[in-house]
Image: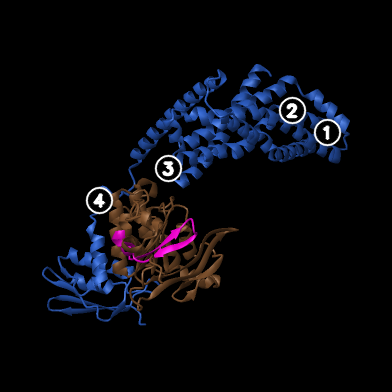
Chain colours: A brown, B blue
Amino acid sequence: MTNPCNAPTVSASEQSHIEVRDLTMAFGDFVLQRDLSFTIPRGSIFVIMGGSGCGKSTLLRHILGLLRPAEGSILLDGEDMTDIDPERRQTLMRRFGVLYQSGALWSSMTLAENISLPLEEYTELSAREIRDISALKLAMVGLRGFEDYYPSEVSGGMQKRAGLARAIALDPEILCIDEPSAGLDPISSKRLDELIQELRESLDTTVVMVTHELPSIYSIGTDSIFLDAETRTMIASGPPTWLRDNCDDPTVHQFMTRGEAPDGV
Amino acid sequence: MTGPRLDVVRDATGILLRPGGSWDIEVETPSGSEVISAIDKLGRGDTLRYDTTKLSAWDSGFLALLLRLEEAATARAVKIDRTGLPDGARRLLALAESAPAREDARRDSGKAPVLDRVGESTIEAVEYADASVEFLGEATQAVSRFFTGRGRYRKRDLWLLVQQAGAGALPIVSLVSFLLGAILAFVGAVQLEQFGATIYVANLVGVAMARDMGALMTGIVMAGRSGAAYAAQLGSMKVNQETDALVTLGISPVEFLVVPRVIALSSMMPLLTLYSVLMGIAGGALVAIVMLDLSLTTYWNQTIDALTVGGIAGGLFKAFVYGILIALAGCRQGMRCGGSASAVGDAATAAVVSSIVAIISAAGVFAWVFYMLGI
């Protein structure tokens, strides 16, 4: 019998970009999540869902290599990232772009300087090209003309978008986003969703996103997993809309319908 | 994989751009200067078109270059036809252009005339002074409320601050004062030996430490230690909107945060200074015994003779005032801290600088007043 909360793989030809195998996340003796196994298909918008404190952000930090797994492995294009020499890992990390929860812009630099820093560090581009590219990135997130502003001088939503511009500065293959809509009004958060989708389609980026904003999960998520804080493992996986319609698990159902009781229970 | 190239084909209707190869942010890409010069030869009615059949991969550098070329083309009223571009590139360009630049957004980076800048900094200085006076007034009121028992603060916070400003500072004060006493003795010994008056090293060290140096050194140490800490604590509370949370509860942050710090530091400073004087005398004694062959008893008796109650009390009073100045300067800088992480660092720096300036100025004033009063 197949678990009703695991959607069948849509097509076998789907290329896996990141693969997580039997991952256990723990802080000392405290196990946060165990036996996580899933694949993130290339070009998908992959949503990590779950209640507060279940380890969503921690999972993202494991994928980014900021934390070491207690057990199991994480593969990027078939290459094990958990057991790798630091130099090679540095090269692989450049294929990631990260948007942190609060933007995490460097407060002593202007928006343009924030975006230029990765370009200056990692490329041989001339100052003029760097300026052009950072202006382009800011324009792509709708911040044309804000190059010389400091993060503290713009609104929270603008900081988020500038953070996104910095995350895509190096044209990453994989874009990791922690809570994109936290602290944003519904309209700004919808715009950010559209922007993420547009960037994914145009640049063919894989997006890994931690969020519990249902509207954005349904509108842009193409695949997802659900982490449960109580059983400490993933209890559902599949496209978000499929999970909403097919998954009977009460926890998942409550989450996906904002706490309404499952039908017929 | 072939490197990026950019071919220009001039034809009857304008220019056909043929980008080819793989554009990657890590390899050097064509600068596009020949294209710009080709565009400059075009005129109204010509078209800029693209053929990307040879293009295998592209990146943001490619897009940024296209935007620059198209800007040049638009300036010459050349039409642009993007149908030859890859789908994704076309959409990203459209996305970049969809948000109009805010007219008021662009910064005026030019330097203002000298008079403007002088005027602006004068206004700023006046506003700063104004706000400082207001802060001082608020703090004075809050302190008087504290002493009439109507002040709102947490006793535990106060005791913790007293501990940090008092016992916590003993090791550094010991070290600095002991060495200072030894240095004074060294300097004095060399001069006094010429007159055979080495015994007066004890007077020199004792009087200098008790009247001025003890309070001054302790003040400078505490400015770096507690003044900076207060600015950083209050500054980060400000950044996290914790002070706003106090205000909305109807609690004055000055009363709740500033007054306990002022009380703690101004009450601990005299005690630390007394300790510092003793350590300084000990340092001087060590040098006198080892270098000048004086006995401990002689040195001690000479010191006791040299010191006066008035001198010691004056030193302690100075320390008390320095404590108030340091705490106020630290808290003042913390309270006016801006909203970002780097602002906290700026506030801590400003706190140390302004408290040291305040201490030294006050020391100057005291020296003059005490001289006039004959203390």
Disc 2 residue type? Answer: Val
Q: Secondary structure at mark 3?
A: loop
Q: Name the residue at the left extreme.
A: B45
Q: Secondary structure at mark 2?
A: helix
In front of the other: B114 or B165: B165
Mark 1 highlights which residue? B198
Q: Quadrant of residue B339?
A: top left
Q: In this image, B291 relative to A173: left or right?
A: right
In front of the other: A143 or A219: A219
Q: CA distance from mark 1 to mark 3?
A: 58 Å
Is residue B5 placed above or below B97 in the rendered structure? below
Is residue B271 placed above or below A204 in the rendered structure? above
Q: Read off the magenta span.
A: A218-242
Q: CA distance from mark 4 to mark 3?
A: 24 Å
Mark 4 and 3 residues: CB-CB less than 8 Å, in contact?
Answer: no
Name the mark nearer the viewer: 1 or 4: 4
Mark 4 highlights which residue? B102
Q: CA distance from mark 1 to mark 4?
A: 77 Å
Q: CA distance from mark 2 to mark 3?
A: 47 Å
Q: In this image, B264 relative to A96: left or right?
A: right
Q: Secondary structure at mark 4?
A: loop
Residue at 44% over, 35% down: B245
Disc 1 residue type? Answer: Thr
Mark 2 highlights which residue? B207
N-terminal-most mark, 2 or 4: 4
Picture disc at residue B339? 3
